[in-house]
Amino acid sequence: MSDPVYDDGLRVRREVLGDEHVDRANARKTGLTEDFQNLITRYAWGEIWTRPGLDRKTRSCITLTALVALGHLDELALHVRAALRNGLTEDEIKEVLLQSAIYCGVPAANSAFAVAQRVLGEPGDLSGAKRDERE
């Protein structure tokens, strides 16, 4: 039986994070983690990211800030890539991190800038994402 919220969440998760990431996450599912992966897909991506109240660029800005504040740097790298897919430019990501420095702390933003610099320097296709305003 198909679950439309899960199916919609999987579609959005793929659009935002990329097929490669979602395929890796699904391939690593175990009896321990399967329910958790399903929860993320259904609720984070199917219930929240599909809501009409905010566009994906805004949701990415909020997500980046929350990850900086909480020091979740592995997730931050993933969501810097997602922010590019969602239409943020490198300059907009920089502004989000600068804003985060004031409200989340300079050490947290310093670590976030290091992650963003590494991610933004990665080669590869980011589904046509713009790197900065000049492109």
Image (cartoon, rainbow, N blue to C red):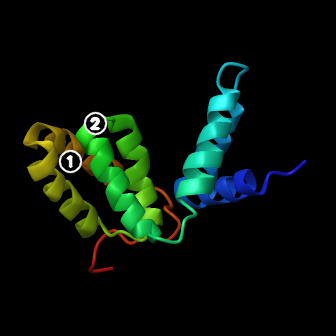
Question: Is residue 135 in view from this perspective?
Answer: yes
The residue shown at (35%, 44%) is 76
x and y, in percent, of residue 67 in the image: 32, 43
The residue shown at (16%, 44%) is 104
Image quarter of residue 61: bottom left
| Up-down relation of residue 52 to residue 99 (above or below) | below
x and y, in percent, of residue 25 in the image: 62, 36
> What secondary structure is found at the residue carrying circle 1?
helix
- On the rendered structure, is 129 left or right of 20? left
Front: mark 1 or 2 = 2
> What secondary structure is found at the residue carrying circle 2?
helix
The disc placed on residue 28 is none
Residues 17 and 67: in front is: 67
Question: Is residue 121 in view from this perspective?
Answer: no
Q: Quickly name the residue at label 2.
A: 70
Separation of residues labelled 1 and 2 (CA atoms): 14 Å
Q: Amino acid at mark 1?
A: Phe
Q: Quickly name the residue at label 1.
A: 113
Q: Residues within 10 Å of mark 1 (few under 14, many from 20)?
A: some
Q: Quadrant of the C terminus?
A: bottom left
